Amino acid sequence: MTRDLAIAIDGPAAAGKSTVARKVAQKLSYIYIDTGAMYRALTLKAIQTGKDLENGEGLAQLLFQTNIELVQETDGQHVWLDSIDVSKDIRTNKVTSHVSYVAEHPQVRKEMVDRQQKLVEQRRVVMDGRDIGTHVIPDAEVKIFMIASVKERAERRHKENLQQGFRSDLGELREEIRKRDEIDSKRETAPLVKAKDAIELDTTSLSVDEVVECIISIVKNKQMEGK
Ligand code: CDP
Ligand code: CDP
């Protein structure tokens, strides 16, 4: 019997968290939870319904009336917002450029963290975001803080966009990433910081598979400790 763990992966935008977290979860037969998708889904609904993104109380009220589900399907994780599949809609530039303003509000974060904590009660999860190791699963057995240079992260996103069939401006991407990192790191509630007991992994010159292997070996070591 191997020990069931919770694995927290945090880090700045486009560091490779979700790609790596998904693969680590697959290898371990764990559940993968993309918490950024939850903030993105609320942001989409707030934009669609014309809500004031500076009103934290109003956004929290909206969240109380909102059902967000992360569903594992054969082609990957889908995000359902009030029974509509919004997996693609939450990745648009408009949502990306507004999500950090929605995620800044303590009232919104409290409800999101409550929902996320319910999903990790059973362990056997890989969860990625900004505050997983510090607030959502402070007792996670494995905490990774994944970083890469801004240049590398912008290039990765650029390449990803090209693969999905649309061109993006590298300079604009770099600026969007830098701005979002700044808001996420400077907000008062649960900012993006490395948890004291997290392992920092600089992935700038590592492939996805190399990062996955590195995390799997950290997990195996942790499981051995429990024996
Ligand atoms: O994938 P990408 O790095 O573009 O971002 P994401 O993980 O989808 O997260 C989108 C935004 O949601 C972040 O820039 C944060 O503002 C917010 N977020 C957060 O505040 N806390 C989390 N645990 C996850 C995301
Ligand atoms: O979730 P996060 O925003 O941190 O990043 P992501 O969406 O998982 O990764 C952004 C892009 O970088 C994806 O296309 C990954 O395949 C790529 N990537 C990479 O090229 N090398 C890595 N070591 C990690 C991710």
Image (cartoon, rainbow, N blue to C red):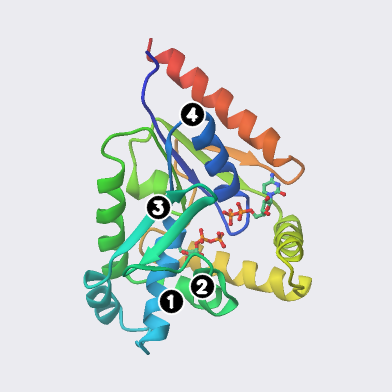
Residue 58 in picture, x, y percent from top left: 26, 81
Cβ–Cβ below 8 Å for labels 2 and 1? yes
Please tell me which of labels 2 and 1 falls first in the chain: 1
Dot 1 alpha-carbon crowd within 10 angstroms: few under 14, some 14 to 19, many 20 or more? many
Please tell me which of labels 1 and 4 falls first in the chain: 4
Say which residue appears at 37% left-offset and 81% top-offset. Answer: 46
Mark 3, residue position: 71
Mark 4, residue position: 28
Residue 167 in picture, x, y percent from top left: 77, 73
- Residue 22's label in the rendered image is none
Please tell me which of labels 4 and 3 falls first in the chain: 4
Quadrant in which residue 107 is drawn: bottom left
Does residue 69 sit above or below 127 in this rendering?
A: below
Mark 1, residue position: 44
The amino acid at mark 1 is Leu
Q: CA distance from mark 2 to mark 1?
A: 8 Å
Note whether ligand 1 is within 8 Å of mark 2. no
Cβ–Cβ below 8 Å for labels 2 and 4? no
Q: CA distance from mark 1 to mark 4?
A: 32 Å
Dot 3 alpha-carbon crowd within 10 angstroms: few under 14, some 14 to 19, many 20 or more? some
Please tell me which of labels 2 and 4 falls first in the chain: 4
Cβ–Cβ below 8 Å for labels 4 and 3? no
The amino acid at mark 2 is Asp
